[in-house]
Amino acid sequence: MARYTGPVCRLCRRHGEKLYLKAERCFSPKCAFERRPNPPGPRPARRRKVSDRGLQLREKQRARVSYGVLERQFVRYYKEAVRRPGVSGENLVRILESRLDNVVFRLGFGESRNQARQIVRHGMITVNGRKLDIPSAQVKEGDTISFSDRGRKSEHFKYITEVIKAKTAPAWLSLDAAGLKGTVIAAPAVAQGETHLFNENVIIEYYSR
């Protein structure tokens, strides 16, 4: 399974905005973006004006990096969003939010999407009682996400048991903190996604040209 394995703090600096890719570190003084907000690499002699196409590319890259999706898969999501009825931009956000690793992150079972992806890949998550180790799997309304037997024996499960009470799930998810399981009760709402970090309509325009 292809994924980005480089330094994630470099991504925040490259895109000029804190993307919260390293959980608690992003809120601490150790955050690389707080210490060095300038882009990585040598500084240019003069600032270049970014074209409209460049601004669209920046929005697309910001969304892709936030959800940990590589380009080929992101293009597939765009094509699926266009095929579905309704507003293409909202469809794209719903597809991204419905990824299993994102739902695990939204429920608070993982401190970041990278950690949530690892939890899923290690077979620690079940969907409707069956183990599912594909981070990109799409969950649907009515699906129940919980820890597998292997997950409940892990040290991570013990940690989550202690901190889950401080977590708040979005309105489209129902979290049972005592049983450490969550249920998808509605379609993801665009306002509850990562749209504060990117403009989904600009991304549609980027691919439509």
Image (cartoon, rainbow, N blue to C red):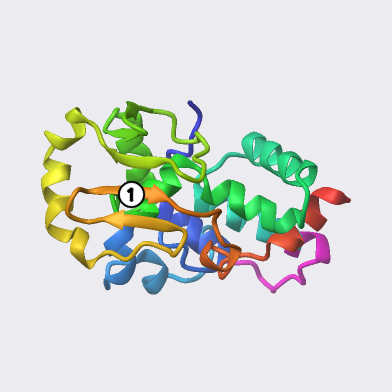
Q: Position of residue 52 (x, y in %)?
A: 82, 66
Counting every numbered tag in the picture gives 1
- Residue 6 visible in the picture: no
Specify whether 24 is left or right of 40.
left
Closer to the camera in the image, 128 or 209: 128
Residue appearing at x 38%, y 48% in the figure: 183
55 vs 157, left or right, is right
Q: Is the magenta stretch mostly helix, strand or loop?
A: loop
The image quarter containing residue 145 is top left
Q: How crowded is mark 1: few (under 14 residues within 10 Å), some or many (20 or more)?
A: many
Q: Is residue 26 left or right of residue 150?
A: right
Q: Which amino acid does label 1 sit on?
A: Gly
Vertical arrangement, residue 110 with respect to residue 198, above or below: above
The residue located at (33%, 26%) in the rendering is: 131
Would residue 144 be found to the left or right of residue 46 on screen?
A: left
Question: What is the x, y in percent for residue 72?
Answer: 66, 34
Query: Which region of the structure is painted magenta?
Result: 42-55
26 or 162: nearer the viewer: 162
- Residue at 82% x, 57% y: name it: 205
Q: Which residue is drawn at 62% across and 64% down?
A: 198
Q: Magenta includes 115?
A: no
Residue wearing tag 1: 182
